[in-house]
Image (tube, grey):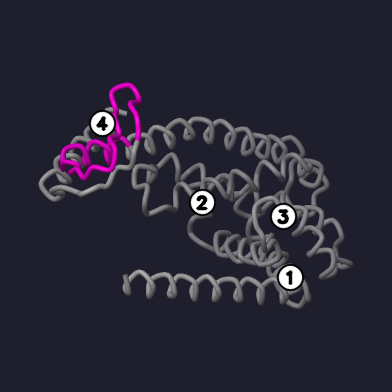
Amino acid sequence: MKKNSYFLVLLAMICTPCVYSVPLNFGAGQGFGPIYVGAQTEGNVSSYALAVVVGLMVAGKIAYDVSWHSEYVARVQNCYGSLRKCIDRHNVTTVEDAALQALASRSMKCEVVFLEQSLRNSYGSWLCPWNWTAQQKAMYHQIQVVAILTMYADLIALGDKVTGADVVQCTRQLFVPVSLYPCVHCYGELRRHIAFAQSLSCSNALFGNTETRLLYGMVPYLEQFASLLMLQNEYVQELQTMKTHELQKEMNNNLAQALSRRR
């Protein structure tokens, strides 16, 4: 936290000479403790006040993120520890092992989906550089390992009988709570998990030999699930709907910008 305090002081020093005064119109108002809003008067907010406001906002964001870090660590370590115990206790050597399927309970998968999404948003955000820590990176890698080896356990249990409909059903069970487009979201997760399992991030320097072999063993399954999902009408319809919504949003933004320039 001391480093974060230094960061805020530096931010205030940078902001102060760069922001001069911002004219604001205040409507009829009243006093709120030390703050009073006058009736239809124009005033200037000093650069110092604005820097303080910005600093407080950043400090609040940092404090919020830091408070979550410790909880993320505990929850990820709990999931990852459960996976390691399962592998060691049952001598798991293949992804088809029933022990992995038993570990992948409904509650376990919900927890993993939430943690992976949260850590990706946190560690991967360019707006929050204070989250770029070695611990965050390790936690993100660990939860990806757990996700790859547990989230798709129901599909692996089906063996050669797995169908596209099975993948869609699994997809909706996993990702409806976190995405308006669960099939599109799942396809993205599958591609990310394939890339992670194949990358140097899964080297023995980070994980044990058994975990690494299991991750590599998941790649053919992940590719199969991604291929089946792409062929389903649900995926095609979601993708088209998402693109339509994005296009409509872009058009609305362009219209709003055009109207603001005319004023």
- Residue to which mark 4 is pinned: 5
Q: Measuring from the top left, give residue 144's x and y in whole percent.
A: 59, 50
Residue 120, label in figure? 2
**Residue at position x 16%, y 43% from top?**
47
Q: Which stretch appears magenta?
A: 29-56
Q: Could you say where residue 229 lies in the image, as x and y percent from the top left?
A: 74, 71
125 relative to 118 in the view: left or right: left
Q: Indicate which label's residue lies in the foreground, 2 or 4.
A: 4
Q: Amino acid at mark 1?
A: Gln
Q: Is residue 35 magenta?
A: yes
In 3D space, how far apart are the residues under numbered discs 4 and 3 (Cα atoms)?
39 Å
Going from N to C along the chain, the mark reached first, 4 or 3, is 4
* Residues under numbered marks 2 and 4 in contact, where contact means CB atoms less than 8 Å apart: no
The foreground one among 177 and 15 is 15
Using residue 139 as the reference point, say whether residue 21 is left or right of it. Answer: left
Q: Residue 147 at what x, y percent from top left?
A: 65, 50
Q: Where residue 98 appears, x then y in whole percent?
A: 83, 47
Secondary structure of the residue carrying tag 3 is: loop
Mark 3–mark 1 distance (CA, rounded to whole Å): 21 Å
In the image, which disc is placed on residue 176? 3
Query: What is the secondary structure assignment of the residue under circle 4?
Result: helix
Tell me the CA gap for discs 1 and 2: 24 Å
Q: Mark 3 touching mark 1, by CB under 8 A?
A: no
Mark before the other along the chain sequence, 3 or 2 = 2
- Disc nearer the start of the sequence (1/2): 2
Circle 1 SS class:
helix
> Between tags 1 and 2, which lies in front?
2
Question: For mark 1, what is the residue?
Answer: 224
Q: Residues within 10 Å of mark 1 (few under 14, many from 20)?
A: some
